[in-house]
Image (tube, rainbow, N blue to C red):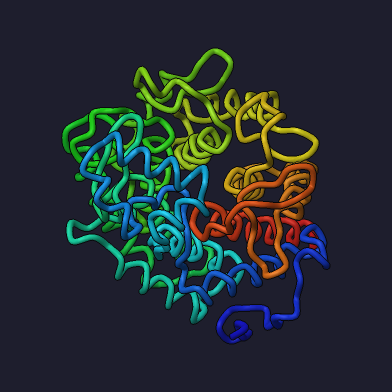
Amino acid sequence: MPASPEDGGSGVGHEYDATALGIQASPRQAAEHLGRWLEARRFAGPDPYSGLAAPRARILGASAVTAQGAIQVTKRFPRVASAVFGHSHVAMAKTMALALSAYAILDEHPSARVRRLRTDLLARRTPSGGFGYEFPVVTRWGSYGQNKPNLVATTFALQGLADAAEVARDGDAPAAGLEIARFALEYFGATTTFLAYHANSSILVHNANVLACGQIARSFRAAGSEPPDQVFTAARLSLAAQRPDGAWPYADHPRCGWVDTFHTLYILDGLHELAHADPDGPWKQSFDRGLAYVYGHCLSDHGPLELPDRDDRPLEGHTVGTALSFFARRTTDHSVLRTLLAAADVLALPDGSFAAHATDGNSHGPAYPRWVGAHMLVGLATSAAELEEQSSS
């Protein structure tokens, strides 16, 4: 069913076609249509990293090598993986958290869908109190189990609650956010001076650490409290890893020295929040250096590059959605914002969803609810709010 104005939606019917109207002309309508697409599927669908959730792939999780193989097949050859392993469609808390952010930004009041999604998100908390992924995870630097709290999923839940509190003025969101922020500091900082990606990990993943520190600081401020020193101590460890050119490696690990665009934007997003919480700290200077790197290496006339200085790779949906959200929230650069909306146009599908990739103007790849759709939803919502504010001023 189309969202009604009372529920917070625009009331635009299913006849809206993002590819026909053009996202640049109406990012708000594109966001509403994408939100309906996600809700019609109850936020469930394929994910590039959910291979071990497939019925016939679960047995492969017994070995790190076979588990990584199943995940890589799912990521690179999704149709083959679905045929071989069975489908791995899951509804994810992180998808709901991002949708909560988007609805708060679109509605700007405690609408029925903001309250409903906040309730549904909090119901997805793990028994220990955080948020995880609904499938086992195996990476090149570690592994953790299904529904085990991880720092990124928990951080996006904090962002959703903070947006509900600050932008939509949802009265129940600040206390929930503060509770989860305190959990995150205790749980992910239990054995390290930084915030670990998951419990018992000793690997400093810079994007997760800084993004989390920023949203934790924001959650404390939204609840009327000062962030504890632990937040700033943890974030400073990642500031020390910023390279002379302004970029950061993914993690302090021999196999994790790469740089990519969306993880760089995660770090800058966290630094922006830390600068608000601690104006006299080093955050703004680090942010400016990192943003200069993004301008110099991560953007092209066709949209954001998945990997810096690699214009030979397809346009990638997750990177476009993340860049839209970042530039709309954290800068006033509307020329870049319009380029990013044009990139989203290339990825748009007639049903309101967005493809994972696009090459030479042709969209292709699965419409991933979490990896692409949810990030694009926040990007479109923040872009609509920023451009509408500009036009009314």
Image point (49%, 35%), residue name: 267
The x and y percentages for residue 337 are 74, 46
The x and y percentages for residue 318 are 57, 47
Q: Which of the 4 image quadrants contains residue 141?
A: top left
Q: Which of the 4 image quadrants contains residue 87?
A: bottom left
Foreground residue among 386 and 188: 188
Foreground residue among 306 and 124: 306
Up the image or down, 17 lies above or below 320; here it is below
Up the image or down, 345 lies above or below 112; here it is above
Image check: 160 left or right of 324? Answer: left
The x and y percentages for residue 60 are 27, 46
List the single residue furthest toward the top: 244
Q: Which of the 4 image quadrants contains residue 388?
A: bottom right
Q: In which quadrant will I find the N terminus? A: bottom right
Image check: 352 left or right of 8? Answer: right
Up the image or down, 168 lies above or below 130; here it is below
Up the image or down, 253 lies above or below 124; here it is above
Image point (39%, 52%), residue name: 50
The x and y percentages for residue 323 are 63, 44
Image check: 324 left or right of 225? Answer: right
Foreground residue among 101 and 302: 302
Residue 220 visible in the displayed image: no
Image point (61%, 35%), residue name: 306
Q: In which quadrant will I find the C terminus? A: bottom right
